[in-house]
Image: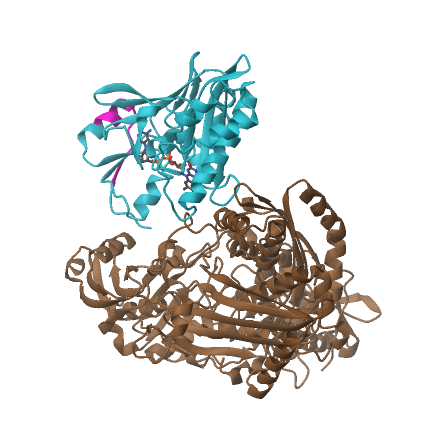
Amino acid sequence: MYPRSFEYVSPGSLDEATSVLASTEGAKVLAGGMSLLPLMKLRLFSPDVLVDIGRIPGLSSIEDRGDHLAIGAMVSHAATASDPSVAEHAAALATAASWTGDVQVRNQGTTCGSIAHADIAADQPSAALALGATMVAASAGGVREIAASDFFVDTLTTALEPGEILTEIRIPKQGGGSAYEKLGRRGGHTDYAVAGAAVWLDVSDGAVCCGRVALTGVGAKPTLAEGVMEALIGTDGSDAAIAEASERALEGVTVLDDLFGTVEYKAHLAKVMTRRALQQAVAAAT
Amino acid sequence: MGGGVVVSTTSVLGGVVKRREDPALIRGTGLYVDDLQLPGMLHVAFVRSPYAHARVVSVDASDAEGMAGVRAVYTAADVAHLGDLVTQVAVGKLRPLLAGDKVNHLGEAVAMVVADTRYGARDAADAVDVEYDPLDPVIDLKEAASDAALVHEDMESNVLLAWEGGPWGDEEAIAATQQAIADAKAQDDTVSVSFEAVNQRLLPMPIEPRSVVADWNVGYGRFTVHSSTQIAHALAGGIAQTFGLSLTDVRCIAPEVGGGFGCKLNVYNDEILVCFASQQLGRPVKFTETRRDAAGSTIHGRGWVATATITGTGDGQILGYELDGIADMGAYSQNFTVAIPFLGLFVGAGQYTFPTHWKVACVHTHTMTTDAYRGAGRPEAAYYLERAIDAFAREIGMDPAEVRRKNFIPADKFPGAATHIGFPMDTGDYETNLDALLETAGYEDLKAERDRLRTEGRLVGLGLATYVEVCGFGPSALVDLGFSWAAYKIPSGFSGSGLVRVQADGTASVIIGTGPTGQGHQTAWAQIVSNQLGIPVENIRVSHGDTAESPLGIGTFGSRSAAVDGSATYEAANKVRAKAADLAAHLLEASADDIMFADGGAHVAGSPDQQVSWSDIATLAYQPHRLPEGMEGGLEAHAVFSPGNATWPFGSHLALVEVDGDTGDVKLLRYIAMDDCGNVINPMIVDGQIHGGLAQGIGQAMFEDGDYEADGNLLKWSFVEYPLPTSADLPSFELHRTVTPTDINPLGVKGIGEAGTIGSAQTVVNAVVDALSPLGVTHVDMPLRPKRVWEAIQAAKTNGSVS
Ligand SMILES: Cc1cc2nc3c(=O)[nH]c(=O)nc-3n(C[C@H](O)[C@H](O)[C@H](O)COP(=O)(O)OP(=O)(O)OC[C@H]3O[C@@H](n4cnc5c(N)ncnc54)[C@H](O)[C@@H]3O)c2cc1C
């Protein structure tokens, strides 16, 4: 529980932070520290320099920018969970944030940190994926946007380059309804997901017209379950249609086992969580 | 000597007095061992084995020794002269202080690094190069018991001993019990139900990890040792024994201790090793374990596999109960290790009358030592027994409450009742307690509601379990059974002590032999003394945990502190009262027999206006020239209480659960407990103890799993892999009690520290099995994590037993 020695810098501006990151090999962004510090204490990961982005002004707000919501890098899980505009336009993310860890973790950890960390059992990455979020990354070389579907590369691996800071995520205000369902490791919604599903969809003229389903806890990274939406689009979103579509949740997913679930169990759960999240999303969209 | 009677309208005993230790603990002003910073203090990190079983080919510490701030690296050869770790119940292989040519469990200490900082110590420990030659480990209990491979090649068998009864130690009588059960099974009108269940290994994980600071004073030739321990006196004696010192040369201080649950009821190799390092280096040396150290090298609890068989007739009469089990001792024996299943044997037949044959073999494996963990043997015994009663009730289609009631030891057998091994029990009224639970909970209504919800397809279950525990150890004569503490130079018997001193200003100091790990001694002991002397609680200060000032007490464990050391303190207070009555009589020119204590002072019966205060009485005591001829000065007394027996609390618990059939997720909806711990000194503390105990028992039932992998790995290094229950995971407990005082001690108290844990795991499992019974499920092993419950549902479905 004692990390190796490291340097700590706390830049006062984004430019300063990106230039430190660009010029310092082995530097790592520190946000809420809820995932990074335990890894360092267990000596599983030992960066030479931590660049704390917590004192940079302007990263702590949730903004409604007309066609999208922007959630800044230092917005805590608790803030995401309780923000009325997130609840209105991105209910799946609000729910995922409210079920992330415990009160201390939600006050200290950040939504962007959870997404940048990309733990296979984390809640909010799948919600961001289902909601079609855009990730905004800043580096000494400039700013770029990365679509959620391109962002999650592998276990604990994203499209962010070493010198990049995820400054915000943008969620389109796209109507419809969204929902997140999970079974936590302690049962209920508590603790990391054994399996979870996030859904956004829209309904027009009594039929499901578009949407995305993203799974967490099941494969190596948050994954879009495209077969489910393929099966559901055009249906009336009835329980029967949902049950049938949910059976396709695992197409293209390699299910991994861990201490909390066998392959068979997680595969089953993925379908159950998909079904439950779809039911809620349909109800919210209609 | 005169008596003196305490007059109080509302007794302090049994009253709600808020815990007096809490302001300091809540505001962060309590001192824990790791808070201690001594000048020149050095820090320790251990090099630990990554293998469950391996030969140590070589240890190369040259890189580590060359690192800045590293003071020393010690290996087995450096400490060989100190021998193995001092151990009370020295059955089986004892632990070397550091592993020599072999390591026998993951996390076993191979080398100790001492450095200027804890970070530097860890860096250097990582730089010690140990070459291992890995060997196959023995992990599985049945394999260990078969002796197919030996854990220790110089031992003849992995099986250390088996605890067996019916009567204990009487082979003929045991054979007769077995015959009676065999005869019952052969009867046409009986049914037998049998099942195998695992009572999984648990990691105690107190919130404060263990921590120790040793300081050798070379001038005085003495150790001062601060340790987060439940047994300060035994630790002092263990250190004295190891280093060839006297008890007065070692002062141990247990300051605030943040939970123990039995894992701090051991003398550890690290406690001895920091003493060694301090002596070698002439500096204070601290070791604070990390959570990872705690998981792999602080003792574990439970770890049994057993088959229970229960036989009886269709009318609910049970004619025999058999338990055949194996208990995991780990690789080395420590303080109590093999004695833990023995505590289970005591209550192997619980509060029932039926013939019982109970046998549990203790085996070594390549894992961390097991020892006392909250309940220690009794939760395991109660788990199998109460699961068996439910299985039998289900088989014959009778209400499980009714089956229990039919087989209880009746209240009129007390006094004089004895356990199945022939050990006398103090007091008990099991049926009244069970009936009180059922009535309070509205059992019949709950059953009706469950049945109604079942018709809607919901998996709702009710679980009942009753228990009797043995605790409040006592009797003093346990010494004669080999539990003598002599290895720690304190062959004190299971007695207790207390010292009460009235200060010159009329306030009282109480110094006790045991210390708390959260049980509220500072409050409860003040209540005991206040009740006897009439000195208000706020004028009484309780201290503990410093062997230089505390009278000898063996420790807080086995729910014994109030029953034994509390009783000693009660008797010490009575001695003080008798003397104070003499002093007051002198001041009031009356007879001591007529002195009454009330309102913070004393008066002569019938003349409450003429009051002398405790300060008047104490002043006289400390001005001996004013005393009448022949009276000694001072106002203090010490008492040792020698209990004639252990105490036997009991209770009945009920749980209501709902299972999500799609996911296996278990929701604990209600938990109702009716406990009986005899008289209650402080209801708030008693409720708090039950709360924590229930959480730990429910933690075993639903969340915690400390079992090793087949290759000897332990994948539970933090609370991510080892989920402890939190308040957010549990319902609001509904607590009630019946009161059946014990006749073993003058306070009539039995002890409540472990009851919640002993009663709860099987209550929850019985409820879940009840919920799943419409699907044909009859057994699920703990912990009832969703995966396991779902798998049980799937198995029942594929067995085609869906109703
Ligand atoms: C007790 C506990 C329980 C938890 N339970 C859950 C749970 O139930 N569900 C769940 O999903 N998670 C859970 N977590 C993880 C938690 O959500 C973390 O807060 C989150 O994963 C990381 O956010 P952070 O701000 O703390 O990031 P940090 O720990 O500071 O960083 C994590 C990683 O992301 C990088 N990073 C962070 N922010 C940025 C950024 N803006 N730009 C670039 N890189 C960045 C860091 O460099 C680091 O590699 C739990 C954690 C704890 C300690």
- Count the marks: 0
> What is the span of residues highlighted in magenta in the rendered image?
A7-19
For the N terminus of chain B, the quadrant is bottom right
Q: Which chain is tinted cyan?
A: A
- Viewer-side residue, B121 vs A248: A248
In the drawing, does residue B470 fall left or right of residue B30? Answer: right
> Residue B208 placed where, x, y %?
44, 56
The vertical placement of B763 against B638, above or below, is above
Q: Is residue A81 visible?
A: no
Which chain corresponds to the colour brown? B
In which quarter of the view is residue B691 placed? Answer: bottom right
- Work out whether B316 lies above or below B718: below
For residue A125, which quarter of the picture?
Answer: top left
Report ligand 1 position as a quadrant.
Answer: top left
Q: Is residue A8 part of the magenta span, yes or no?
A: yes
Residue B414, relative to residue B109: is it above or below?
A: below
Residue at 23% from the left image edge and 28% from the top image edge: A163
Residue B15 is situated, as x and y percent measured from the top left of the image, at 70, 58
Q: Nearer the viewer, residue B598 or A266?
A: A266
Q: Residue B751 versus residue B734: which sits nearer the camera?
A: B734
Q: Residue at x 39, y 77 (%)?
A: B92
Residue at image coords 47%, 74% = B361
* Residue B372 placement (x, y as % from top left): 48, 67
Color style of the picture? by chain
Image-quadrant location for residue B53: bottom left
Q: Position of residue B531 (x, y in %)?
A: 70, 66
